[in-house]
Amino acid sequence: METHQKLSIIGAVLLVITFLINNYHQEVHPDEVLNYAYVTGIAMLVFFSISFIMFTKDRLNS
């Protein structure tokens, strides 16, 4: 399995975790300002972006 595929899988797992954290936050702590889903959401975007860049770079080189 290539590196960009592993990063995409990690990004997908972070997507699910982000959704679950956000759903929990909306139901249990709706008045709190800090939502920890932002942390996993940003990490998800970083992993997906790196994966996309690596995939695109590999395809342009071949």
Image (tube, rainbow, N blue to C red):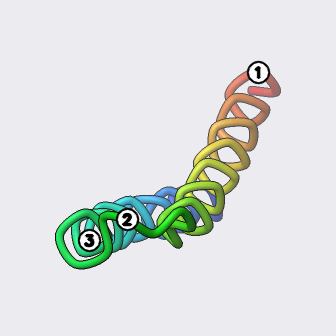
Looking at the picture, which amino acid does disc 3 mark?
Leu
The kind of secondary structure element at disc 1 is: helix
Residue 60 is labelled as: 1
Looking at the picture, which amino acid does disc 2 mark?
Asp
In the picture, measured across the screen, residue 15 lies left or right of residue 7, that is: left
**x then y, percent, for residue 29:** 31, 75
**x then y, percent, for residue 34:** 57, 67
Crowd band around label 2 with a 10 angstrom C-alpha radius: few (<14), some (14–19), many (20+): few
Q: Earlier in the sequence, mark 3 or mark 2?
A: 3
Taking the spot 64% from the left edge, 55% from the top edge, the residue there is 42
Quarter of the figure with the C terminus: top right
Q: Earlier in the sequence, mark 3 or mark 1?
A: 3
**x then y, percent, for residue 5:** 51, 58
Q: Can you identify the residue that label 2 sits on?
A: 31
Q: Can you identify the residue that label 3 sits on?
A: 20
- Seen from the viewer's position, the closer of residues 21 and 26 is 26
